[in-house]
Amino acid sequence: MSSSPSKRAAPAVSEVRNFIDGEYRSSSGGKTFDNVNPCTGALNGKVHEATSEDVDAAVRAARAALYGPWGKMSDAERGEILHRVADGIDARFEEFLEAECADTGKPHGIASHIDIPRGAANFRVFADAVKNFATEAFQMATPDGKGAFNIAVRKPKGVIAVISPWNLPLLLMTWKVGPALACGNTVVVKPSEETPTTTSLLGEVMNEAGVPPGVFNVVNGFGADSAGAFLTEHKGVDAITFTGETRTGEIITRAAAKGLRDVSMECGGKNPALVFADCDLEKAIEGTLRSAFANCGQVCLGTERVYVERPIFDEFVARLAEEAGKFKLGLPQDADTDMGPLVSHEHQRKVLSYYQLAVEEGAQVVLGGGVPDMPPELAGGAWVQPTIWTGLADDARVNREEIFGPCCHVRPFDTEDEAIALANDTDYGLAAAIWTENTSRALRVSTAINCGIAWVNSWFLRDLRTAFGGAKESGMGREGGEHSLEFYTEMQNVCIKI
Ligand SMILES: NC(=O)c1ccc[n+]([C@@H]2O[C@H](COP(=O)([O-])OP(=O)(O)OC[C@H]3O[C@@H](n4cnc5c(N)ncnc54)[C@H](O)[C@@H]3O)[C@@H](O)[C@H]2O)c1
Ligand SMILES: O=C/C=C/C=C(\O)C(=O)O
């Protein structure tokens, strides 16, 4: 089923330290934790866990750098440096690729087309966007007849805490760091404990590109009672940008309430796909295969609920299962690998508990439902089978809770109104995919779904200038294009009396 026994998972950086004030520093408490390869269960290396003193040093370095050369540069000068950061990622593409795949287990095909290039693009796009970011001006009348002008200026918000997840580590971290730095802020990043390596490696690139010390800092560790909480509760942090689970977002929002710090929250989803009988079936199947199973289902925008118009329901389910059943599970570096493992054994236990729950809740298992049979050298990995269910009630937990694995439930519908109601019957509101060749229907349905991002006849087609974020429990605020620039700046109105 997988690669030859002679192949090994990619070696990774063996020791990941914190990056503070332009240099790599060991944990001041001497504490480390394991970074485990999810393909094999082997040790990738050790990660230095930041103490509260380390986090404090990082925040202080970021504060000092804000008042140093970085804060005094023009957008154009900063932009030039950020372009060099992007070039630096490109120049070390292979290193980033190996590190990302060793931490996540994802296939090279995904990381080399999405994660690493987007990691570089996030710096270029925002370095350029900030140059065209206009403010506002209002001329007003005054009783003396002379008038006044109001001119708005935008300033960096200050020290930004960036808390990022493990599913697209470099991509989602730079999606925040790129615009934050382009706007003149400084950052302290706490990457996921599961996937710290590419964030750490970025420190070297920052130094090589000429980013002044203290502008980009990295502290490693966990959430509660660790680097995540130390950072988000730190008084020296001016704003917090977070991507991760909704429940974690709530905890961080509470921490941010102290001192009324601003937050940007990109959280979970339970995203629907609506497949109408007038769709291009080939495209709908190909798109749903990606939206449900890409990155082993670990994409916040991924589909976990598929609603299919009854006349094509049986054919759709059969074809989806047939194609997903052909996925080859294997090592990142094998060219024919379609799907890697889940990110960790902990996440594997969570996903498998939902596989079991689906059966208990009365699902028909159309495909998968368990652990695949892997060759001995991969037996220690966090593998699960791609899984498709039908027959669950709409209020089944499997239909309501985010699983974040390679699985979906497929259910028939009879009318457009019913499909819209089913799509909206969720606590979440991140993304939706609509498959129809009828343009009026596409517009009607996409705008009737309460979510931040709706795709018609596509999925994960991303223009970085567009608004990105979730409705309901999927988040708060928008990032992307000008929306990121708004979040990472503070607007000041200057009123000038003539
Ligand atoms: N909306 C989006 O843009 C988006 C994108 C990717 C992932 N996600 C969501 O992320 C989740 C998967 O990622 P995850 O499991 O890494 O999420 P998570 O919430 O467990 O962890 C995210 C980050 O928060 C940190 N953290 C955890 N507890 C914390 C605390 N108390 N204080 C401070 N930091 C804390 C973690 O260490 C990690 O760095 C899914 O729910 C997925 O939908 C959302
Ligand atoms: O798992 C979530 C994926 C989010 C993707 C983006 O934020 C993006 O493409 O910018």
Image: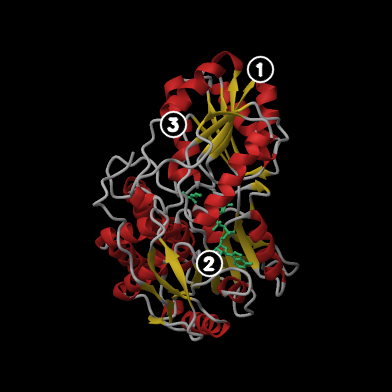
> Which label's residue is closer to the chain start, 3 or 2?
2
Q: Position of residue 47 (x, y in %)?
A: 44, 73
Is 213 left or right of 278, judged from the image as shown?
A: left
- Identify the residue shown where x is 54% and y is 17%: 314
Q: Quick check: 442 above or below 113?
A: above
What residue does disc 1 label?
414
- Mark 3: which secondary structure? helix
Q: Is residue 412 visible?
A: yes
Mark 1 neighbour class, 10 Å CA radius: few under 14, some 14 to 19, many 20 or more = some
Residue 324, numbered label: 3
Neighbourhood count class around disc 3 (C-alpha, 10 Å): few under 14, some 14–19, many 20 upward: many
Q: Please indicate, yes or no, whether residue 273 appears anywhere in the rendered image.
A: no
Q: Residue at x 61, y 55 (%)?
A: 245
Q: Amino acid at mark 3?
A: Ala
- Tell me the amino acid under the disc marked 2: Val
Check contact, mark 3 vs mark 1: CB within 8 A.
no
User: Height in image: 347 above or below 21?
Assistant: above
Note whether ligand 1 is within 8 Å of mark 1: no
Local secondary structure at mark 2:
strand
Q: Nearer the viewer, residue 68 or 50?
A: 50
Residue appearing at x 64%, y 79% in the figure: 235
Alpha-carbon distance for marks 3 and 1?
Answer: 25 Å
Picture coordinates of residue 104, whole percent (x, y): 42, 55
* Extreme-top residue of the structure: 311
Residue 263 image offset from top left, x and y in percent = 63, 63
Image quarter where the C terminus lies is bottom right
Rounded to the nearest angstrom, the CA distance separating label 2 from label 1 is: 44 Å
Circles 3 and 2 in contact, beta carbons < 8 Å: no
The quarter of the picture showing ligand 1: bottom right
Residue at numbered disc 2: 162
